Image: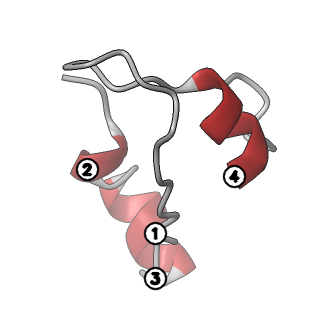
Amino acid sequence: MGSGEATVGDLGRRLRCSQCGNRQIGVTVQPDTRTAEVIERDGPAPETQLG
């Protein structure tokens, strides 16, 4: 969403089901629990990247 400061509500309003087009979706936020050193060394977690 750009700024990295989107709330779950912001995400919920913008997302839509790719199969049925419904906007009643659930959002689960998974924080990156790695240490700062590991994040700096390895970069962003693969599951947070597109594709």
Which structural element holds mark 1?
Answer: loop
Q: CA distance from mark 3 to mark 1?
A: 9 Å
The image quarter containing residue 45 is: bottom left
Q: Amino acid at mark 4?
A: Val
Pointers 1 and 2 in contact (CB under 8 A)? yes
**Residue 5's spot in the image, x, y percent?**
81, 44
In the picture shown, does residue 23 fall above or below 5? above
Q: Amino acid at mark 1?
A: Gln
Residue topped by disc 1: 30
In the picture shown, does residue 20 fall above or below 23? above
Q: Amino acid at mark 2?
A: Glu
In this view, the mark in front (3 or 1)? 1
Residue topped by disc 2: 47
* 48 on left or right of 25: left
Residue topped by disc 4: 8
Looking at the image, tell me whether mark 4 or mark 3 is earlier in sequence order. 4
In the picture shown, does residue 32 fall above or below 10? below
Looking at the image, tell me whether mark 1 or mark 2 is earlier in sequence order. 1
Which structural element holds mark 3?
Answer: loop
**Residue 1's spot in the image, x, y percent?**
66, 24
Q: What residue is at 48 percent from the left and 84 percent from the top? A: 35
